Amino acid sequence: MTEIEDIKQKLDIVDIVGQYVSLKKSGKNYKGLCPFHGEKTPSFMVNQELQIFKCFGCNEAGDMFSFVEKMEGYDFRQALETLAERAGVKLKEFSRNENVEGNKSILFEINEVTKKFYHYILTKHQVGKSALDYLLDKRKLTLKTINDWELGYAPNSWSSLLDFMLKKGYQEKDLLRAGVIMPDKFERKSNDKFRGRIIFPLTGIDGKVLGFGGRTTTDREPKYLNTQETSIFHKENFLFGLNKTRMEIKTVGAVIVEGYMDAISAYQVDVSNIVATCGTALTMPHLKIISRYTKDLTFCFDSDNAGVNATLRAIDLCAQLDLNPKVAVLPEGSKDIDDLAKTGNDGVKNMLANALPAYDFVIRVIESKNDGKTAIGKKKIMEEVCSFLSRSPNPALKSHYAQILGDKLTVSPDSILEYMQNHDQEKMKTQIDASISLNTVKSPQDYLLALLFTQDKLDKSKEILQNLTAEDLPQSQNSSVYSKLLNYIEKQSDLSVKSFIEGLTEQDLVKARDLSLWDMSDFNKNEEDYIKELTETIKRVKKESNKRKMSNLTYQIRDAEKRDDAETVRKLTKEFKEISEATTL
Protein backbone atom coordinates (compact mmCIF):
# COMPACT_ATOMS: atom_id res chain seq x y z
CA MET A 1 0.00 0.00 0.00
CA THR A 2 1.37 3.42 -0.93
CA GLU A 3 1.53 6.35 1.51
CA ILE A 4 -1.31 8.07 -0.35
CA GLU A 5 -3.51 4.96 -0.18
CA ASP A 6 -2.71 4.60 3.52
CA ILE A 7 -3.74 8.20 4.20
CA LYS A 8 -6.97 7.83 2.21
CA GLN A 9 -7.82 4.68 4.12
CA LYS A 10 -7.37 6.39 7.49
CA LEU A 11 -9.05 9.72 6.70
CA ASP A 12 -12.50 10.61 5.43
CA ILE A 13 -12.94 13.39 2.87
CA VAL A 14 -16.20 14.41 4.57
CA ASP A 15 -14.25 15.19 7.77
CA ILE A 16 -11.50 17.02 5.85
CA VAL A 17 -13.91 19.17 3.81
CA GLY A 18 -16.14 19.64 6.85
CA GLN A 19 -13.38 21.66 8.53
CA TYR A 20 -13.97 24.38 5.94
CA VAL A 21 -17.49 23.82 4.58
CA SER A 22 -20.78 23.21 6.37
CA LEU A 23 -21.98 19.96 4.77
CA LYS A 24 -25.45 18.45 4.84
CA LYS A 25 -26.43 14.94 3.83
CA SER A 26 -28.02 14.98 0.38
CA GLY A 27 -29.05 11.54 -0.78
CA LYS A 28 -25.92 9.45 -1.14
CA ASN A 29 -23.71 12.57 -1.11
CA TYR A 30 -23.04 15.60 1.06
CA LYS A 31 -23.81 19.14 -0.12
CA GLY A 32 -22.63 22.64 0.84
CA LEU A 33 -21.72 26.11 -0.43
CA CYS A 34 -18.59 26.04 -2.57
CA PRO A 35 -15.54 27.51 -0.78
CA PHE A 36 -13.88 28.36 -4.09
CA HIS A 37 -16.43 30.81 -5.51
CA GLY A 38 -19.27 32.93 -4.18
CA GLU A 39 -22.69 31.29 -4.39
CA LYS A 40 -26.01 31.32 -2.57
CA THR A 41 -27.35 27.96 -3.72
CA PRO A 42 -25.24 24.92 -2.74
CA SER A 43 -23.55 23.30 -5.72
CA PHE A 44 -20.57 21.72 -3.94
CA MET A 45 -20.94 17.93 -3.63
CA VAL A 46 -18.86 15.38 -1.70
CA ASN A 47 -19.14 11.63 -2.29
CA GLN A 48 -18.06 9.73 0.81
CA GLU A 49 -18.02 6.34 -0.88
CA LEU A 50 -15.65 7.41 -3.67
CA GLN A 51 -13.84 10.01 -1.49
CA ILE A 52 -14.17 12.77 -4.11
CA PHE A 53 -15.69 16.25 -4.42
CA LYS A 54 -16.93 18.49 -7.22
CA CYS A 55 -18.50 21.94 -7.49
CA PHE A 56 -21.02 22.05 -10.33
CA GLY A 57 -20.80 25.86 -10.29
CA CYS A 58 -17.08 26.46 -10.85
CA ASN A 59 -16.06 22.87 -11.78
CA GLU A 60 -13.38 22.52 -9.10
CA ALA A 61 -13.05 18.79 -8.42
CA GLY A 62 -10.72 16.19 -6.97
CA ASP A 63 -9.87 14.19 -3.85
CA MET A 64 -8.88 15.19 -0.31
CA PHE A 65 -5.34 16.11 -1.43
CA SER A 66 -6.42 18.47 -4.18
CA PHE A 67 -9.02 19.98 -1.83
CA VAL A 68 -6.38 20.84 0.79
CA GLU A 69 -4.03 22.13 -1.92
CA LYS A 70 -6.72 24.49 -3.22
CA MET A 71 -8.00 25.62 0.17
CA GLU A 72 -4.64 26.29 1.77
CA GLY A 73 -2.62 27.32 -1.29
CA TYR A 74 -0.32 24.31 -0.83
CA ASP A 75 1.64 22.34 -3.37
CA PHE A 76 1.05 18.58 -3.38
CA ARG A 77 3.91 17.82 -1.01
CA GLN A 78 2.59 20.26 1.59
CA ALA A 79 -0.91 18.77 1.34
CA LEU A 80 0.56 15.27 1.61
CA GLU A 81 2.53 16.20 4.74
CA THR A 82 -0.49 17.88 6.34
CA LEU A 83 -2.82 14.94 5.79
CA ALA A 84 -0.12 12.39 6.69
CA GLU A 85 0.36 14.09 10.04
CA ARG A 86 -3.38 14.03 10.67
CA ALA A 87 -3.63 10.37 9.68
CA GLY A 88 -0.57 9.36 11.69
CA VAL A 89 1.22 8.13 8.58
CA LYS A 90 4.99 8.50 8.54
CA LEU A 91 6.31 9.69 5.18
CA LYS A 92 9.56 8.55 3.67
CA GLU A 93 12.34 11.12 3.70
CA PHE A 94 12.41 13.10 0.53
CA SER A 95 15.53 14.53 -1.02
CA ARG A 96 15.82 18.23 -1.55
CA ASN A 97 16.77 17.55 -5.14
CA GLU A 98 13.35 16.00 -5.71
CA ASN A 99 11.65 19.38 -5.33
CA VAL A 100 10.83 20.32 -8.90
CA GLU A 101 10.01 23.93 -7.98
CA GLY A 102 13.55 24.91 -7.23
CA ASN A 103 14.23 23.21 -3.92
CA LYS A 104 11.73 25.12 -1.79
CA SER A 105 12.54 23.08 1.30
CA ILE A 106 15.93 24.75 1.72
CA LEU A 107 14.27 28.19 1.57
CA PHE A 108 11.84 27.25 4.34
CA GLU A 109 14.78 25.95 6.37
CA ILE A 110 16.80 29.14 5.85
CA ASN A 111 13.84 31.30 6.86
CA GLU A 112 13.26 29.25 10.01
CA VAL A 113 16.88 29.60 11.10
CA THR A 114 16.83 33.31 10.19
CA LYS A 115 13.71 33.86 12.31
CA LYS A 116 15.34 32.21 15.33
CA PHE A 117 18.55 34.23 14.82
CA TYR A 118 16.72 37.57 14.76
CA HIS A 119 14.43 36.56 17.67
CA TYR A 120 17.48 35.67 19.77
CA ILE A 121 19.13 39.00 18.96
CA LEU A 122 16.00 40.91 20.05
CA THR A 123 15.21 39.01 23.24
CA LYS A 124 18.57 37.69 24.49
CA HIS A 125 21.43 39.77 23.05
CA GLN A 126 22.70 43.17 24.10
CA VAL A 127 22.63 44.33 20.47
CA GLY A 128 18.84 44.06 20.47
CA LYS A 129 18.20 45.76 23.82
CA SER A 130 17.31 49.19 22.41
CA ALA A 131 14.92 47.60 19.90
CA LEU A 132 13.31 45.53 22.69
CA ASP A 133 12.90 48.65 24.86
CA TYR A 134 11.29 50.41 21.88
CA LEU A 135 8.71 47.65 21.49
CA LEU A 136 8.01 47.37 25.21
CA ASP A 137 7.94 51.07 26.13
CA LYS A 138 6.92 53.00 23.02
CA ARG A 139 4.81 50.41 21.18
CA LYS A 140 3.38 48.98 24.44
CA LEU A 141 3.86 45.34 23.46
CA THR A 142 4.24 42.75 26.19
CA LEU A 143 7.10 40.27 26.26
CA LYS A 144 4.49 37.52 25.82
CA THR A 145 3.24 39.15 22.60
CA ILE A 146 6.80 39.55 21.31
CA ASN A 147 7.45 35.86 21.94
CA ASP A 148 4.06 34.72 20.58
CA TRP A 149 4.67 36.52 17.28
CA GLU A 150 8.40 35.59 17.33
CA LEU A 151 9.47 39.16 16.57
CA GLY A 152 13.15 39.80 16.01
CA TYR A 153 15.77 42.44 15.43
CA ALA A 154 18.25 42.71 12.55
CA PRO A 155 21.46 44.38 13.77
CA ASN A 156 22.50 47.58 12.01
CA SER A 157 25.48 45.90 10.38
CA TRP A 158 26.24 44.75 6.86
CA SER A 159 26.65 41.00 7.30
CA SER A 160 25.74 39.68 10.75
CA LEU A 161 23.16 37.24 9.36
CA LEU A 162 25.23 36.37 6.28
CA ASP A 163 28.28 35.50 8.41
CA PHE A 164 26.16 33.42 10.80
CA MET A 165 24.43 31.48 8.02
CA LEU A 166 27.65 30.76 6.13
CA LYS A 167 29.15 29.36 9.34
CA LYS A 168 26.06 27.15 9.68
CA GLY A 169 26.86 25.68 6.27
CA TYR A 170 24.27 27.40 4.08
CA GLN A 171 25.23 28.50 0.59
CA GLU A 172 25.16 32.15 -0.44
CA LYS A 173 23.12 31.39 -3.58
CA ASP A 174 20.36 29.85 -1.44
CA LEU A 175 20.40 32.82 0.96
CA LEU A 176 19.93 35.10 -2.06
CA ARG A 177 17.03 32.98 -3.32
CA ALA A 178 15.38 33.13 0.11
CA GLY A 179 15.69 36.92 0.08
CA VAL A 180 17.46 37.27 3.45
CA ILE A 181 20.55 38.77 1.80
CA MET A 182 20.96 40.88 -1.32
CA PRO A 183 23.79 41.90 -3.64
CA ASP A 184 25.22 45.39 -3.19
CA LYS A 185 24.60 47.95 -5.94
CA PHE A 186 27.82 46.95 -7.72
CA GLU A 187 26.89 43.26 -7.39
CA ARG A 188 30.39 42.49 -6.14
CA LYS A 189 29.32 41.01 -2.81
CA SER A 190 26.22 40.32 -0.76
CA ASN A 191 24.92 42.05 2.35
CA ASP A 192 22.12 41.43 4.80
CA LYS A 193 18.79 42.62 3.37
CA PHE A 194 17.48 43.78 6.76
CA ARG A 195 19.68 46.07 8.82
CA GLY A 196 18.65 48.10 11.87
CA ARG A 197 15.06 46.83 11.67
CA ILE A 198 12.42 45.19 13.83
CA ILE A 199 11.71 41.85 12.12
CA PHE A 200 8.24 40.40 11.59
CA PRO A 201 8.27 36.76 10.39
CA LEU A 202 5.70 36.25 7.60
CA THR A 203 4.34 32.83 8.53
CA GLY A 204 2.05 30.75 6.35
CA ILE A 205 -0.95 28.87 7.71
CA ASP A 206 1.14 25.69 7.81
CA GLY A 207 3.55 27.36 10.26
CA LYS A 208 6.36 27.72 7.73
CA VAL A 209 8.11 31.07 7.42
CA LEU A 210 7.65 32.44 3.90
CA GLY A 211 9.58 35.70 4.30
CA PHE A 212 10.05 38.73 6.54
CA GLY A 213 8.94 42.29 7.04
CA GLY A 214 11.20 44.83 8.66
CA ARG A 215 10.47 48.22 10.27
CA THR A 216 13.39 50.60 10.55
CA THR A 217 14.59 51.78 13.95
CA THR A 218 16.73 54.43 12.28
CA ASP A 219 15.93 57.08 9.68
CA ARG A 220 16.60 54.64 6.85
CA GLU A 221 14.06 54.55 4.01
CA PRO A 222 11.78 52.85 3.35
CA LYS A 223 10.11 52.77 6.74
CA TYR A 224 8.89 49.21 6.06
CA LEU A 225 10.70 46.66 3.92
CA ASN A 226 9.41 43.24 2.86
CA THR A 227 11.03 40.16 1.40
CA GLN A 228 10.88 40.41 -2.39
CA GLU A 229 8.85 37.91 -4.42
CA THR A 230 10.42 34.45 -4.12
CA SER A 231 9.34 30.96 -5.08
CA ILE A 232 7.66 30.63 -1.66
CA PHE A 233 6.52 34.22 -0.92
CA HIS A 234 3.94 36.09 -2.99
CA LYS A 235 2.79 39.29 -1.33
CA GLU A 236 -0.59 39.50 -3.02
CA ASN A 237 -1.47 36.01 -1.75
CA PHE A 238 -0.34 36.56 1.84
CA LEU A 239 -2.29 37.83 4.83
CA PHE A 240 -0.28 38.49 7.98
CA GLY A 241 -1.65 36.74 11.07
CA LEU A 242 -3.94 34.31 9.24
CA ASN A 243 -1.92 31.39 10.63
CA LYS A 244 -3.03 32.44 14.15
CA THR A 245 -6.54 33.74 13.57
CA ARG A 246 -8.17 31.72 10.78
CA MET A 247 -10.22 29.45 13.07
CA GLU A 248 -11.65 32.43 14.96
CA ILE A 249 -12.33 34.16 11.63
CA LYS A 250 -14.46 31.18 10.54
CA THR A 251 -16.64 31.77 13.60
CA VAL A 252 -16.96 35.56 13.91
CA GLY A 253 -15.69 37.05 10.64
CA ALA A 254 -12.46 38.92 9.87
CA VAL A 255 -11.06 42.30 10.84
CA ILE A 256 -8.67 43.50 8.12
CA VAL A 257 -6.01 46.11 8.88
CA GLU A 258 -3.03 47.54 7.03
CA GLY A 259 0.19 46.79 8.90
CA TYR A 260 1.96 44.27 11.10
CA MET A 261 1.81 46.44 14.22
CA ASP A 262 -1.90 47.09 13.67
CA ALA A 263 -2.57 43.34 13.71
CA ILE A 264 -0.24 42.54 16.62
CA SER A 265 -1.45 45.38 18.86
CA ALA A 266 -5.10 44.51 18.20
CA TYR A 267 -4.41 40.82 18.86
CA GLN A 268 -2.81 41.79 22.17
CA VAL A 269 -6.10 43.43 23.28
CA ASP A 270 -8.04 40.25 22.42
CA VAL A 271 -9.05 40.94 18.80
CA SER A 272 -8.34 37.36 17.80
CA ASN A 273 -9.90 37.49 14.31
CA ILE A 274 -7.53 39.99 12.72
CA VAL A 275 -5.30 39.90 9.62
CA ALA A 276 -3.14 42.49 7.87
CA THR A 277 -2.21 43.11 4.25
CA CYS A 278 1.48 43.79 5.04
CA GLY A 279 1.13 47.47 4.20
CA THR A 280 0.25 46.71 0.58
CA ALA A 281 -3.05 47.48 -1.13
CA LEU A 282 -5.82 44.94 -0.59
CA THR A 283 -6.11 42.73 -3.68
CA MET A 284 -8.71 40.35 -5.09
CA PRO A 285 -6.46 37.36 -4.21
CA HIS A 286 -6.46 38.59 -0.59
CA LEU A 287 -10.26 38.65 -0.56
CA LYS A 288 -10.53 35.24 -2.21
CA ILE A 289 -8.28 33.78 0.48
CA ILE A 290 -10.25 35.31 3.35
CA SER A 291 -13.57 34.36 1.72
CA ARG A 292 -12.61 30.70 2.19
CA TYR A 293 -13.17 31.28 5.90
CA THR A 294 -15.88 33.96 6.05
CA LYS A 295 -17.99 36.42 4.06
CA ASP A 296 -18.17 38.89 6.96
CA LEU A 297 -15.36 41.46 6.87
CA THR A 298 -14.62 44.60 8.88
CA PHE A 299 -12.06 47.01 7.44
CA CYS A 300 -10.07 49.20 9.81
CA PHE A 301 -7.54 51.10 7.75
CA ASP A 302 -5.70 54.29 8.71
CA SER A 303 -7.83 57.39 9.28
CA ASP A 304 -5.93 59.56 6.75
CA ASN A 305 -7.07 60.18 3.16
CA ALA A 306 -5.00 57.28 1.87
CA GLY A 307 -6.70 54.96 4.37
CA VAL A 308 -10.18 56.20 3.43
CA ASN A 309 -9.47 55.72 -0.27
CA ALA A 310 -8.08 52.24 0.40
CA THR A 311 -11.30 51.40 2.28
CA LEU A 312 -13.46 52.57 -0.64
CA ARG A 313 -11.44 50.43 -3.06
CA ALA A 314 -11.81 47.44 -0.73
CA ILE A 315 -15.61 47.88 -0.59
CA ASP A 316 -15.69 47.98 -4.38
CA LEU A 317 -13.75 44.69 -4.58
CA CYS A 318 -16.06 43.04 -2.05
CA ALA A 319 -19.05 43.62 -4.33
CA GLN A 320 -17.49 41.35 -6.96
CA LEU A 321 -17.44 38.44 -4.49
CA ASP A 322 -20.75 39.32 -2.82
CA LEU A 323 -19.08 39.67 0.59
CA ASN A 324 -20.54 41.48 3.62
CA PRO A 325 -18.14 44.32 4.45
CA LYS A 326 -18.29 46.79 7.33
CA VAL A 327 -16.01 49.69 8.23
CA ALA A 328 -14.72 50.38 11.73
CA VAL A 329 -14.32 54.17 12.05
CA LEU A 330 -11.40 55.24 14.25
CA PRO A 331 -12.26 57.81 16.95
CA GLU A 332 -10.77 61.31 16.89
CA GLY A 333 -7.15 61.29 17.95
CA SER A 334 -6.33 57.76 16.75
CA LYS A 335 -4.54 57.46 13.44
CA ASP A 336 -4.74 53.66 13.30
CA ILE A 337 -5.89 50.66 15.36
CA ASP A 338 -2.37 50.27 16.77
CA ASP A 339 -2.70 53.77 18.23
CA LEU A 340 -6.14 53.02 19.68
CA ALA A 341 -5.02 49.69 21.16
CA LYS A 342 -2.54 51.52 23.40
CA THR A 343 -5.55 52.91 25.32
CA GLY A 344 -6.69 49.37 26.19
CA ASN A 345 -9.29 46.79 25.20
CA ASP A 346 -12.46 48.83 25.52
CA GLY A 347 -11.72 51.44 22.85
CA VAL A 348 -10.97 48.83 20.18
CA LYS A 349 -13.90 46.59 21.09
CA ASN A 350 -16.37 49.49 21.09
CA MET A 351 -15.12 50.69 17.71
CA LEU A 352 -15.49 47.24 16.17
CA ALA A 353 -18.90 46.68 17.76
CA ASN A 354 -20.14 49.91 16.18
CA ALA A 355 -18.67 49.30 12.72
CA LEU A 356 -20.74 50.83 9.91
CA PRO A 357 -22.24 48.80 7.08
CA ALA A 358 -19.95 49.45 4.12
CA TYR A 359 -22.37 51.52 2.03
CA ASP A 360 -23.30 53.68 5.04
CA PHE A 361 -19.60 54.52 5.14
CA VAL A 362 -19.56 55.20 1.39
CA ILE A 363 -22.49 57.64 1.73
CA ARG A 364 -20.85 59.35 4.70
CA VAL A 365 -17.57 59.89 2.83
CA ILE A 366 -19.25 61.13 -0.36
CA GLU A 367 -21.61 63.43 1.56
CA SER A 368 -18.62 64.99 3.33
CA LYS A 369 -17.20 66.07 -0.06
CA ASN A 370 -20.39 67.47 -1.56
CA ASP A 371 -23.13 69.93 -0.56
CA GLY A 372 -26.33 67.88 -0.40
CA LYS A 373 -28.47 71.01 -0.30
CA THR A 374 -27.63 72.10 -3.84
CA ALA A 375 -28.76 70.52 -7.10
CA ILE A 376 -25.16 69.98 -8.23
CA GLY A 377 -24.25 68.49 -4.85
CA LYS A 378 -27.22 66.10 -4.98
CA LYS A 379 -26.29 65.08 -8.51
CA LYS A 380 -22.70 64.31 -7.52
CA ILE A 381 -23.73 62.38 -4.39
CA MET A 382 -26.20 60.25 -6.35
CA GLU A 383 -23.71 59.57 -9.17
CA GLU A 384 -20.86 58.63 -6.85
CA VAL A 385 -22.90 56.50 -4.45
CA CYS A 386 -24.69 54.74 -7.30
CA SER A 387 -21.38 53.94 -8.97
CA PHE A 388 -20.60 51.82 -5.88
CA LEU A 389 -24.05 50.32 -5.42
CA SER A 390 -24.50 49.41 -9.08
CA ARG A 391 -21.63 46.94 -8.82
CA SER A 392 -23.36 44.97 -6.10
CA PRO A 393 -25.24 41.87 -7.33
CA ASN A 394 -27.69 42.10 -4.43
CA PRO A 395 -31.07 43.68 -5.36
CA ALA A 396 -32.23 43.87 -1.72
CA LEU A 397 -29.15 45.88 -0.80
CA LYS A 398 -29.68 48.23 -3.75
CA SER A 399 -33.32 48.76 -2.83
CA HIS A 400 -32.40 49.43 0.81
CA TYR A 401 -29.88 52.12 -0.05
CA ALA A 402 -32.07 53.61 -2.77
CA GLN A 403 -34.56 54.36 0.03
CA ILE A 404 -31.88 55.83 2.32
CA LEU A 405 -30.35 57.92 -0.47
CA GLY A 406 -33.79 59.03 -1.64
CA ASP A 407 -34.66 60.30 1.86
CA LYS A 408 -31.37 62.19 2.08
CA LEU A 409 -31.64 63.80 -1.36
CA THR A 410 -35.45 64.11 -1.50
CA VAL A 411 -35.44 61.96 -4.64
CA SER A 412 -37.75 59.00 -5.22
CA PRO A 413 -36.12 55.58 -4.58
CA ASP A 414 -37.47 54.38 -7.93
CA SER A 415 -35.52 57.14 -9.72
CA ILE A 416 -32.35 56.05 -7.95
CA LEU A 417 -32.91 52.38 -8.79
CA GLU A 418 -33.56 53.32 -12.43
CA TYR A 419 -30.34 55.36 -12.47
CA MET A 420 -28.42 52.40 -11.04
CA GLN A 421 -29.91 50.08 -13.61
CA ASN A 422 -28.86 52.36 -16.44
CA HIS A 423 -25.47 53.14 -14.93
CA ASP A 424 -22.63 52.22 -17.25
CA GLN A 425 -20.96 49.26 -15.55
CA GLU A 426 -19.18 46.13 -16.47
CA LYS A 427 -21.79 43.41 -16.59
CA MET A 428 -21.45 40.79 -13.94
CA LYS A 429 -20.88 37.32 -15.36
CA THR A 430 -24.09 35.37 -15.31
CA GLN A 431 -23.76 32.57 -12.85
CA ILE A 432 -25.70 29.46 -13.66
CA ASP A 433 -27.71 28.22 -10.74
CA ALA A 434 -25.88 25.06 -9.96
CA SER A 435 -28.63 23.36 -8.05
CA ILE A 436 -29.16 20.62 -10.55
CA SER A 437 -32.61 20.35 -12.05
CA LEU A 438 -31.63 17.08 -13.56
CA ASN A 439 -34.65 16.37 -15.76
CA THR A 440 -34.44 19.71 -17.55
CA VAL A 441 -30.87 21.02 -17.35
CA LYS A 442 -29.17 17.70 -18.01
CA SER A 443 -29.88 15.07 -20.62
CA PRO A 444 -31.98 11.98 -19.80
CA GLN A 445 -28.88 9.90 -20.59
CA ASP A 446 -26.88 11.69 -17.88
CA TYR A 447 -29.79 11.44 -15.48
CA LEU A 448 -30.09 7.69 -16.09
CA LEU A 449 -26.49 7.04 -15.10
CA ALA A 450 -26.68 9.44 -12.13
CA LEU A 451 -29.80 7.61 -10.96
CA LEU A 452 -28.07 4.24 -11.18
CA PHE A 453 -25.14 5.60 -9.16
CA THR A 454 -27.43 6.53 -6.25
CA GLN A 455 -27.60 2.82 -5.46
CA ASP A 456 -25.05 0.77 -3.55
CA LYS A 457 -25.61 -2.23 -5.80
CA LEU A 458 -27.03 -2.80 -9.30
CA ASP A 459 -28.83 -6.09 -8.71
CA LYS A 460 -32.27 -4.38 -8.56
CA SER A 461 -31.53 -2.66 -11.88
CA LYS A 462 -30.10 -5.58 -13.82
CA GLU A 463 -33.25 -6.85 -15.50
CA ILE A 464 -34.62 -3.40 -16.42
CA LEU A 465 -31.34 -2.31 -17.99
CA GLN A 466 -31.62 -5.05 -20.59
CA ASN A 467 -34.27 -2.89 -22.29
CA LEU A 468 -31.61 -0.37 -23.29
CA THR A 469 -28.44 -0.77 -25.34
CA ALA A 470 -25.33 1.38 -25.39
CA GLU A 471 -26.37 2.58 -28.86
CA ASP A 472 -29.41 4.23 -27.30
CA LEU A 473 -27.10 6.70 -25.54
CA PRO A 474 -25.82 9.05 -28.25
CA GLN A 475 -23.13 10.85 -26.26
CA SER A 476 -19.94 8.87 -26.77
CA GLN A 477 -18.85 9.06 -23.12
CA ASN A 478 -22.27 8.00 -21.83
CA SER A 479 -22.39 5.20 -24.37
CA SER A 480 -18.94 4.01 -23.33
CA VAL A 481 -19.80 4.01 -19.61
CA TYR A 482 -23.16 2.29 -20.20
CA SER A 483 -21.59 -0.35 -22.44
CA LYS A 484 -19.10 -1.19 -19.69
CA LEU A 485 -21.93 -1.18 -17.16
CA LEU A 486 -23.92 -3.77 -19.14
CA ASN A 487 -20.80 -5.90 -19.46
CA TYR A 488 -20.15 -5.54 -15.72
CA ILE A 489 -23.61 -6.68 -14.60
CA GLU A 490 -23.45 -9.62 -17.01
CA LYS A 491 -20.11 -10.95 -15.78
CA GLN A 492 -19.90 -9.93 -12.13
CA SER A 493 -21.73 -11.42 -9.16
CA ASP A 494 -21.06 -8.60 -6.67
CA LEU A 495 -22.75 -5.71 -8.48
CA SER A 496 -21.24 -2.90 -6.38
CA VAL A 497 -21.53 0.58 -7.88
CA LYS A 498 -18.33 1.64 -6.14
CA SER A 499 -16.39 -1.29 -7.60
CA PHE A 500 -17.77 -0.59 -11.07
CA ILE A 501 -16.76 3.11 -10.99
CA GLU A 502 -13.32 2.44 -9.52
CA GLY A 503 -12.72 -0.12 -12.26
CA LEU A 504 -13.15 2.47 -15.01
CA THR A 505 -10.24 4.32 -16.59
CA GLU A 506 -9.47 7.73 -18.07
CA GLN A 507 -12.46 9.70 -19.38
CA ASP A 508 -14.98 7.02 -18.42
CA LEU A 509 -13.83 7.36 -14.80
CA VAL A 510 -14.08 11.17 -14.93
CA LYS A 511 -17.60 10.98 -16.36
CA ALA A 512 -18.82 8.40 -13.82
CA ARG A 513 -17.36 10.32 -10.89
CA ASP A 514 -19.06 13.52 -12.04
CA LEU A 515 -22.41 11.79 -12.32
CA SER A 516 -22.01 10.10 -8.93
CA LEU A 517 -21.71 13.59 -7.39
CA TRP A 518 -25.00 14.87 -8.79
CA ASP A 519 -27.43 16.23 -6.22
CA MET A 520 -30.14 13.57 -6.15
CA SER A 521 -31.53 14.61 -2.76
CA ASP A 522 -35.04 15.11 -4.18
CA PHE A 523 -35.17 11.48 -5.21
CA ASN A 524 -36.86 9.10 -2.76
CA LYS A 525 -34.62 6.11 -2.05
CA ASN A 526 -37.62 3.80 -1.54
CA GLU A 527 -37.01 0.70 -3.70
CA GLU A 528 -40.41 0.83 -5.36
CA ASP A 529 -39.96 4.50 -6.27
CA TYR A 530 -36.46 3.83 -7.56
CA ILE A 531 -37.63 1.03 -9.88
CA LYS A 532 -40.47 3.21 -11.13
CA GLU A 533 -38.16 6.18 -11.77
CA LEU A 534 -35.57 3.97 -13.48
CA THR A 535 -38.24 2.44 -15.71
CA GLU A 536 -39.60 5.84 -16.73
CA THR A 537 -36.10 7.20 -17.37
CA ILE A 538 -35.22 4.24 -19.59
CA LYS A 539 -38.45 4.83 -21.53
CA ARG A 540 -37.47 8.51 -22.06
CA VAL A 541 -33.97 7.55 -23.22
CA LYS A 542 -35.40 4.86 -25.52
CA LYS A 543 -37.96 7.29 -26.92
CA GLU A 544 -35.25 9.86 -27.71
CA SER A 545 -33.15 7.11 -29.28
CA ASN A 546 -36.09 6.00 -31.46
CA LYS A 547 -36.73 9.58 -32.58
CA ARG A 548 -33.12 9.88 -33.67
CA LYS A 549 -33.33 6.57 -35.53
CA MET A 550 -36.56 7.66 -37.27
CA SER A 551 -34.97 10.97 -38.28
CA ASN A 552 -32.01 9.11 -39.72
CA LEU A 553 -34.29 6.65 -41.55
CA THR A 554 -36.23 9.55 -43.09
CA TYR A 555 -33.04 10.83 -44.75
CA GLN A 556 -32.14 7.31 -45.90
CA ILE A 557 -35.64 6.76 -47.41
CA ARG A 558 -35.41 10.07 -49.31
CA ASP A 559 -32.00 9.10 -50.61
CA ALA A 560 -33.28 5.67 -51.74
CA GLU A 561 -36.29 7.30 -53.46
CA LYS A 562 -33.95 9.60 -55.39
CA ARG A 563 -32.08 6.51 -56.57
CA ASP A 564 -35.36 4.70 -57.43
CA ASP A 565 -34.30 1.88 -55.11
CA ALA A 566 -37.77 0.47 -54.32
CA GLU A 567 -36.53 -2.52 -52.30
CA THR A 568 -34.49 -0.34 -49.97
CA VAL A 569 -37.39 2.07 -49.60
CA ARG A 570 -39.66 -0.82 -48.64
CA LYS A 571 -37.24 -2.21 -46.02
CA LEU A 572 -36.51 1.20 -44.51
CA THR A 573 -40.20 2.14 -44.43
CA LYS A 574 -41.02 -1.11 -42.61
CA GLU A 575 -38.26 -0.42 -40.08
CA PHE A 576 -39.50 3.15 -39.64
CA LYS A 577 -43.06 1.89 -38.97
CA GLU A 578 -41.88 -0.66 -36.39
CA ILE A 579 -39.88 1.95 -34.49
CA SER A 580 -42.72 4.45 -34.70
CA GLU A 581 -45.20 1.97 -33.23
CA ALA A 582 -42.78 1.06 -30.43
CA THR A 583 -42.32 4.74 -29.62
CA THR A 584 -46.03 5.41 -29.23
CA LEU A 585 -46.60 2.43 -26.90
Image (tube, rainbow, N blue to C red):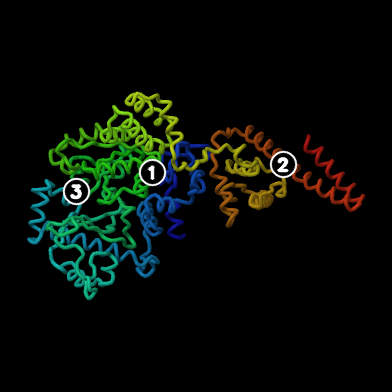
The residues tagged by marks 2 and 3 sit, at their Cα atoms, a distance apart of 67 Å
> Which residue of the protein is positioned furthest toward the bottom in this rendering?
188
Quadrant assignment for the C terminus: top right
The mark nearer the N terminus, 2 or 3, is 3
Circles 3 and 1: CB distance less than 8 Å?
no
Residue 488 visible in the shown view: no
Q: Position of residue 454 (x, y in %)?
A: 57, 41
- Above or below — where is 241 with respect to 433? below
Of badges 3 and 1, nearer the viewer stands: 3
Write down the residue under mark 3.
Answer: 261
| Comparing labels 2 and 3, the label whose residue is closer to the camera | 3
Dot 2: few (<14), some (14–19), or many (≥20) neighbours within 10 Å? some
Residue at disc 2, secondary structure: helix
For the point 58% across and 49% down, the residue is 512
Q: State how far apart marks 3 and 1 are (Cα).
A: 28 Å
Left or right position of 315 against 172: right
At which x and y percent is residue 127? 9, 61
**What is the three-letter code of the residue carrying label 1?**
Tyr
Above or below, 102 relative to 66: below
Q: Judging from the image, what secondary structure is the residue with disc 1 in?
A: loop
Q: Amino acid at mark 3?
A: Met
- Say if residue 420 shows up in the picture: yes
Label for residue 544?
Answer: 2
Residue displayed at 72% across by 41% down: 544
* Front residue (pair 143, 162): 162
| Front-most of residues 181 and 562 | 562
Q: Residues within 10 Å of mark 1 (few under 14, many from 20)?
A: some
In the image, residue 236 lies at what x, y percent? 33, 53
Which mark, residue 20?
Answer: 1
